[in-house]
Amino acid sequence: MSDKKRKRVLSGVQPSGDLTIGNYIGALKQWAREQHKYESYFCVVDLHAVTVPHDPGELRAKTREVAALYLACGIDPQASTVFVQSHVPAHSELAWLLNCVTPIGWLERMTQYKEKSGKRDKESISTGLLDYPVLMAADILLYQADVVPVGDDQRQHLELTRDIAQRFNRLFGETFTVPEAMIPPAGARVKGLDDPLAKMSKSYTGSDYHAVYLLDPPNRVKKKIMRAVTDTDPERKIIFSDDPEKAGVNNLLEIFAALTDMDREAVLAHFANARGYGDLKKAVVEVVNETLAPIQQRFHELTSEAGYIDELLAEGAERAAAIANETLALARENMGFLKPHRRL
Ligand code: AQP
């Protein structure tokens, strides 16, 4: 295994839609906060985004947009390596090697696969959707990552990555670092504003009031949050609660806590004199817009300089490939592949 001086972090987001405050709270905010503690690799996981039907032009545009949002949210490209997954072919190759040590039953048990394949006819679901977690394992294991910052929704996939790494190491000798998940203390699973029992997702298109997107203008943010589903509790209790009846209020409180970095006690004290849910919603609108304003400004600066993001991604891919190819070579060697040799 490679000799790392610092612990390594790897994470990524799919360019499968407009990034939401769920992606920010569950992933980007943590990445930016922790990036200097670790040797950090952040990729735009475009190979994952084609596991469901997609538009090619949209994929290209979103790949650039997501990379620019990483930087706008505080990822420092000098300190961290930012790249596009498909620019480093080792990801696809390691995924194939790992496919061959991953029992299919492990994949069929994944909640995200069951949710996304749902009741759809098997003829319309790609093999890639089932195989998604193996590609994710390849992403992580290629960089010998110690830590993977993700939202709670990805916890199961991370467990699977650990199982795959352990199985490979057992079968072929020590090859991969077995990574740990880093789940944020608040807002680990931000829920839809229109349905507080469902995860807020960037690819959900069923309602205009489901998610706040990172590039939403302030008036749209306000409209969405003021319309967020709450409950009919006559006492209008503003409390953190696991009760599905209070899921809407709980979600707004979680978003507020995550964006202000306040603990639950401080948040409840903050709303002790609130007059009903209107006050809670107004406070959430304010904190969301305060968070988004500098991100949007930076995003517009970064994307107004033609070619800047593409150049940075090309540099990032070179740095990433140097590490990834080393791990891939070790995995190939340990699995017993013959190296190409020419007679001199
Ligand atoms: N609602 C959420 N709350 C907290 N964290 C979240 N993440 C996503 N949604 C929430 C975190 O964002 C990162 C990016 O995930 P991804 O793009 O690889 O896929 P995902 O988890 O499936 O995210 P989406 O937004 O739901 O995308 P689509 O709709 O394309 O499937 C991960 O770290 C995730 O935990």
Image: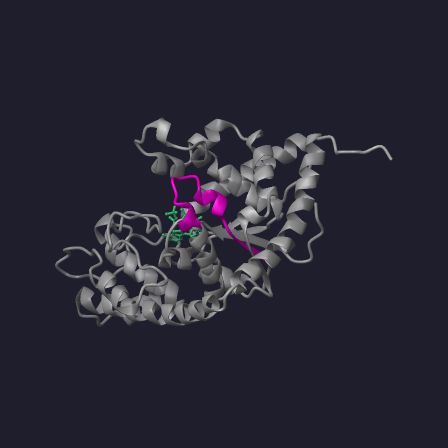
- Residue at image x 53%, y 65%? 308
The image position of residue 16, as x and y in percent, is 40, 49
- Count of numbered tags: 0
Residue extent of the magenta highlight: 40-59
Q: How is the image coloured?
A: one colour
Q: Residue at x 37, y 71 (%)?
A: 293
309 or 99, nearer to the observer: 309
Q: Is residue 37 left or right of residue 215?
A: right
Q: Quadrant of residue 24?
A: bottom left
Q: Nearer the viewer, residue 311 or 217?
A: 311
Q: Is residue 55 magenta?
A: yes
- Point out residue 248 in the picture as x, y percentages from the top left corner: 24, 55
**Residue 310 drawn in magenta:** no
Comparing 263 with 190, the one in front is: 190
Residue 192 point in image, percent of width and height:
29, 52
> What percent of the width, then of the height, locates residue 339?
75, 34
Report the side of 50 relative to 265 (left or right): right
Residue 78, by quadrant, is: bottom right
Image height check: is 250 above or below 102?
Answer: below
Q: Is residue 263 visible?
A: no
- Res 240 → quadrant: bottom left
Q: Residue furthest right?
A: 344
Quadrant of the rendering where the C terminus is positioned: top right
Asked if one can make out residue 85 in the rendered structure from this viewpoint, the answer is: yes
Residue 253 vertical placement versus 298 (above, below): above
Given residues 211 and 257, the one toward you in this image is: 211
Q: Work out which quarter of the rendered image holds the N terminus and state it.
A: top right
- Which residue occupies 20% across, 56% down? 230
- Residue at the outermost left position: 234
